[in-house]
Amino acid sequence: MNNDLDFKSPELFGSVVFRPDFNSFKTINASQAWSLFFTGGREDKKLDSNPRISLFFTSILLVLGVSGFARAVIIQTFFPA
């Protein structure tokens, strides 16, 4: 059996975003971005490029932002300081 893996390479266990073959200024999709976020930059294909999962997480983030803004407006309107 021939083993050609170089385990001393810093790219093997490092973050995927610092590997030379990852970023050539190509655009990534939302699934890859969320996968990088959840894995701390270690994997970009953890969510299997499923657009529904990335849409779900993006929607949650938007709803949290809108509800926080609406809460602040409602509190300022009904309970002025």
Image (cartoon, rainbow, N blue to C red):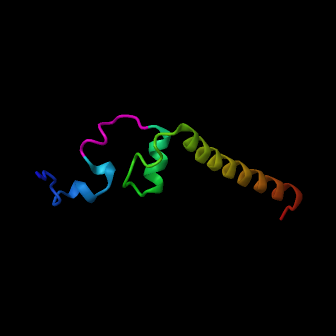
Residue 14: give x, y in percent of width and height. Answer: 28, 58
Question: Hey, which residue is sitting farthest right in the picture?
Answer: 78
Which quadrant of the rendered structure holds the C terminus? bottom right
Magenta span contains residue 44: no
Residue under the image location 59 percent in, 48 percent down: 57
Question: Hey, which residue is sitting farthest top in the picture?
Answer: 26
Q: Main secondary structure of the magenta part?
A: loop
Q: How many marks?
A: 0
Residue under the image location 39 percent in, 54 percent down: 41
In the image, is 42 to the left or to the right of 81?
left
> Which quadrant of the figure has residue 20?
top left
Residue under the image location 46 percent in, 53 percent down: 37
Residue 67: give x, y in percent of width and height. Answer: 73, 51
Question: Hey, which residue is sitting farthest left in the picture?
Answer: 2
Q: Nearer the viewer, residue 61 or 13?
A: 13
> Which quadrant of the figure has residue 8?
bottom left
In the image, is 19 to the left or to the right of 9?
right
- On screen, residue 51 above or below 41: above
- On screen, residue 52 above or below 78: above
Question: Hey, which residue is sitting farthest bottom in the picture?
Answer: 81
Residue 51: give x, y in percent of width and height. Answer: 54, 37
In the image, is 52 to the left or to the right of 42?
right
> Which quadrant of the figure has residue 6?
bottom left
Residue 24: give x, y in percent of width and height. Answer: 29, 37
In the image, is 20 to the left or to the right of 36?
left
Residue under the image location 32 percent in, 51 percent down: 16
Which residues are the magenta region? 20-28
